[in-house]
Amino acid sequence: MTVQNKAMLITYPDSLGKNIKELTEVLEHDFGDAIGGVHLLPFFPSTGDRGFAPVDYKDVDPQFGTWEDVEKLGEKYYLMFDFMINHISRQSEYYKDFKKNKDASKWADLFLSWDKFWPEGHPTQEDIDLIYKRKDRAPYQEIHFDDGTTEKLWNTFGEEQIDMDVRTQVTKDFIKSTLESLIDHGADIIRLDAFAYAVKKLGTNDFFVEPEIWDLLNEVDEVVKAKKAEILPEIHEHYSMPFKISDHGYFVYDFALPMVTLYSIYSGKTDQLAKWLTMSPMKQFTTLDTHDGIGVVDARDILTQDQIDFTTNELYRIGANVKKKYSSAEYHNLDIYQINTTFYSALGDNDQRYFMSRLIQVFAPGIPQVYYVGLLAGKNDIKLLEETKEGRNINRHYYTKKEVAEEVKRPVVASLLKLLSFRNNEVAFDLDGSIDVETPDEHSIIISRLSADGSQKAVMEANLKDLTYSVKVNGEKVEF
């Protein structure tokens, strides 16, 4: 199966039912044709970060199921898998072999030595300050070899996630064989997690390093394209970086839309939303929520700093059970530029505001991705948050099959499923088609989507102050 222009669900393998088999049952029984694709968050054996510290990609973690379960899911839905191009677990066989055999290990070149990276006399404090990092320490940790010696290795993220050296042939071969295997098991699109951190180069901030980042993407794309799949580079930063990736022909994420949408609904004003929708590329996946927090830095220069501050303050004022401390070190927040909350609770658990936000997402350029908690208009899970003291767990509720069956009966969820089904089946949302955006006054917006052949036109008119809207296709009203 190839990537389809249909809404994609983002979910962990054990969050809608207890495993992949139950997830498949939930999709077929409860969601109808509202979902066309599934981003199955990491389902490999892992030692941290809810799957993002993979031990290997050869196996499905037995608690989630088997490759047969994954492949069966792929018979009906196009699939996205994660590949952590920046790192691998320090509990992996590769790391353990390196620890045991040091430079004699066949995996020695898989890892990036901090000590060997720097010339004599470096790194200085100036070198370390230059590195783009989202935690307050130099990005390395020591490996203690079995012979009693130690060495520093690059370690950008959590202590279980040891960086790989993407420049070496050993790593290139590992990347190639892993990607080919993932596609053979049903991946239609590979999400390159944390790819902007993967290239390190002296004299740079070691983030989105050009031109080397393009060499890496081209190498990966060659492997993936040969297998008739796609790549989606993941980057949380200023919109100009995803736009560069888009200019190179790749799919990108719209991570700015969440803050722009919140600002628009909080303020009732449509000008910045209209500007952003007009700028956005069509070959993208849109988001309002993901397994991480709501990205703030992504909307910089789309919203002014005053507008970002307004949105952040309103989120804490209006949001249901949203507190600043949930995005702090007290709750193990890894990223100071993200706010931990469900999108539904960010809007005060308000059905009308929430449906309006999803209506905006559906009419935006690109393919909508909907996180599983968002698909069920989920509230902040304070119980799970406090039990684990993990900030992001506020948006990671574990739903049983029974819970899902109850949640889909709620009017806001039923309307959202109808909306997504409409989006999946309406040719006006053709990615080769066009979008036109008008703002008759400061509170109103008209978004028109026209199919490439001009035969189908879907128009959404909304007032963000009083939250009224209408949707028409070729002049005929559509109800949700």
Image (cartoon, rainbow, N blue to C red):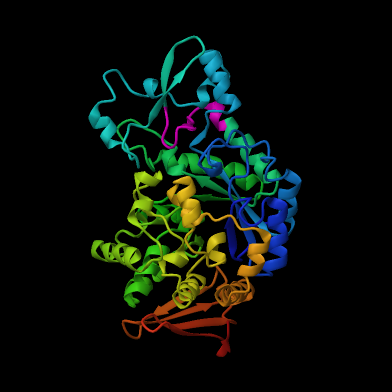
Q: Position of residue 11 (x, y in %)?
A: 59, 55
Q: Residue at x 58, y 75 (%)?
A: 419
Q: Position of residue 244 (x, y in %)?
A: 41, 53
Task: Answer whether residue 343 is visible to the viewer in this image.
Answer: yes
Q: Residue at x 42, y 31 (%)?
A: 155
Q: Foreground: 404 or 154?
A: 404
The N terminus - image quarter: bottom right
Q: Foreground: 177 or 423?
A: 423
Q: Position of residue 212 (x, y in %)?
A: 42, 38
- Asked whether, in this view, residue 41 is left or right of residue 181, the answer is left
The C terminus - image quarter: bottom right
- Asked whether, in this view, residue 180 is left or right of residue 120, the answer is right
Q: Position of residue 72 (x, y in %)?
A: 75, 53
Placement of 307 over or under 79, stated as above or below = below
Rendered image quadrant of residue 343 = bottom left
Placement of 142 over or under 462, stated as above or below = above
Q: Foreground: 292 or 253?
A: 292
Q: Is residue 247 one of those drawn in magenta? A: no
Rendered image quadrant of residue 347 = bottom left
Which segment is the magenta one?
154-172
Rendered image quadrant of residue 115 = top left
Task: Answer whether residue 291 is visible to the viewer in this image.
Answer: no
